[in-house]
Amino acid sequence: MSTDVKEYDLIVIGAGAIGENVADRAVQGGLSALLVEAELVGGECSYWACMPSKALLRPAEAVHSAQHVNGAKQAVTGEIDVEAVLKRRDSFTSNWDDSGQVAWVKGAGIELLRGHAVFTGVKELQVTTPDGETVRLRARHAVTASTGSTSLLPDIPGLADARPWTSREATSAKSVPARLVIIGGGVVAAEMATAYSSFGTRVTILSRSKLLAKEEDFASLAVTESLRELGVDLRIGESATEVHRDAEGIVHTTLRDGTVLDSEEILVAAGRLPRTGDLGLEAIGLTPHQWLETDDTLLVLGDDGKPLPGEWLYATGDVNHRVLLTHQGKYQARAAGDVIAARATGQAVSDAPWGRHVATADHQSVPQVTFTEPPVASVGLTSVAAEKAGYRTKVVDYEIGYVAGASVHIDGYKGHARMVVDEDRKVVLGVTFVGPDVQELLTSATMAIVGEIPLDRLWHVVPAYPTISEVWLRLLETYGRDASA
C-alpha cells in the first residue's frame, strides 16, 4: 500500500456518461479531475442499456415501418436476421471494449484510475486497483458519486439461484432463447419483450399492474395491445411464487395458481437499487445501500436534510434517484460540474430555479421515450399527475392519424397525442405522443414546457406541411374549440 496521497480538485466515482460529463465540465472550469472506474469507462448506457437496447429494437422498427407503406412493403420479403442484429448491436458497444472512451477521457484532460473506491473520510478515498494495489486519494474541493444503479431482485424463492437475466444480460446476449419469461411491466420489460418477440422468441410477461403504469392510460393500452399482436403472452396482475432452473438449464416459473411456465431464460425487470452498498458511506456519516438524496445543485443531503458539512459531496445520475434516465443524469452532470468549478474558484452561483447551476428540469419537465412498437414519447406531467399536483387543467386529445403528414408517413397511421394545459397560466404542463416515430416530436414539446411558452405564442410556431409535427396545430385548434364552447 502506497503511503502517498494523490490530490485532485475533483474526484468522480464512476466513469459512465454522467461521471464523464461532471469531470469534463469541471475541467473546462479550470479544475483538475480524476475519474475512478471499476468496470468499463462509458458505463451502463454505453454497454448494457440505452445504446445496445436501441440497437436491438431498431431493425424490427424499420421493417415494421416499411411493411406499412404500400410500395415499400412489397420489397420486404424476408425475416429479421437475428445474427446480423446482434452483430450490429456489438458494433455499438465496441464489443465491450472501452479504449475509445478512455481516449476521449485523456483527450479531455481528465485523469483515469481503474479500481474500486471507498470513502475513508471527508474528501478522502481509498482505491483498490485490479492488480491489488491500494491508492489513497484526497479531493481539494469536491467528490461526486456517479455510481449508478443495479437491478432489483425480487424476493421470490429460488429466483437468485436460477441465474436470472437482468437488463445487462438481456441487452448483451450472444444468442436468442426460444422462450423468455419477463418479471415486470415497466420500460425495460416492454422494450425487451418487443425486441425478443421480433426475434421469434416466445415471450411471457408477468406484471403485477398494467404496463407502463406511470404513463397516460392510452399509452399503456396501446403498448399492451401491440405486444399482444406481436404474440407476447401478457399476464397482468400475475406474479411468480417460485423459480427453479433444472440441470438441463430450463427455468420453471410457478405462478400463484400453480401454473408452471417453462423457459430457457427469465428476465427480472422489476426496479432498480442504488450502487452505494460498498462505497464506505458509513465513514462519512451516511447509510450504505441508500439513495443519495441531493438538493438542486446536486449536493448530497444528510439525515437533517441539509448538505453535508463543508458542502463537498455531490451525487449525479441514477444514484440520487431523482430521475433514472441517462439524458437527465447528463443534464445533472453539467449543472454539477459547473457549480463545483464555480464554488471552487469563488465565482457566483446561479442556483435560482432554471439557473445554470441547478437541475430544475428534474421535477416536472422530464422527457422520456419508450421504444416499443409503437413508441411512447412523453414529457412533463400526465393528466393524473397534474391533477394530483393541484393544477387546474384542461386535457386536449387528438388522433395523430388525422394529420396529413402522418397519413403520408405510414399507411393507416395509428397514434394519439395528449396535451395537458395549466388553465391558470395558459401554458403546457405535459405532452404524451404514441405512434410511429413520435420520439422526434419530443424536443419541441420539451421546449414548450421548459420555456413555459404561452399558448398565444405557440399559435405562431407554424409546423411544416405535411409533417407529423402538424399535430401541434391540431392540438391548439382543439383546445381553442373547447375553450370557446
Image (spheres, grey):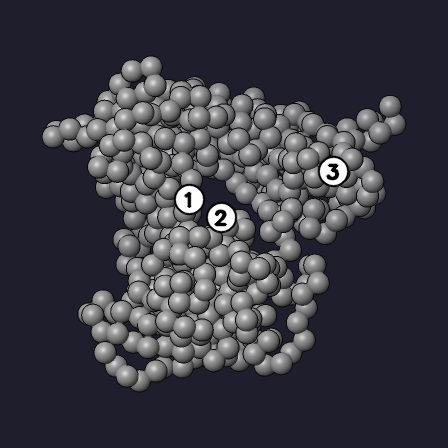
Q: Is residue 127 left or right of residue 249?
A: right
**What type is the residue that disc 1 sits on?**
Arg
In the rendered image of this protein, does residue 386 appear above or below residue 457? above
- Name the mark nearer the viewer: 3 or 2: 3
**Disc 1 element:** strand
Residue 176 in sight: no
**Disc 2 element:** loop
- CA gap between label 2 and label 1 equals 9 Å
Residue 41 horizontal/vertical position (percent):
35, 62
Give the residue displayed 46% in from the left and 34% down from the top.
186
- CA gap between label 3 and label 1 equals 29 Å
Determine which residue is flagged by label 2. Answer: 324
Residue 155 placement: quadrant: top left
Residue 4 placement: quadrant: bottom left
Residue 454 in sight: yes
Q: Residues within 10 Å of mark 1 (few under 14, many from 20)?
A: some
Determine which residue is flagged by label 3. Answer: 390
In the rendered image of this protein, does residue 100 appear above or below residue 58? below
In the rendered image of this protein, does residue 134 appear above or below residue 14? below
The circle on residue 462 is: none
Query: Would you say the residues marked 2 and 1 are in contact, meaning their CB atoms lie under 8 Å apart?
Result: yes
Determine which residue is flagged by label 1. Answer: 272
Give the residue displayed 44% in from the left and 30% down from the top.
185
Residue closest to the far bottom: 4
Q: Nearer the viewer, residue 92 or 270?
A: 270
State which tag comes first along the sequence, 3 or 1. 1
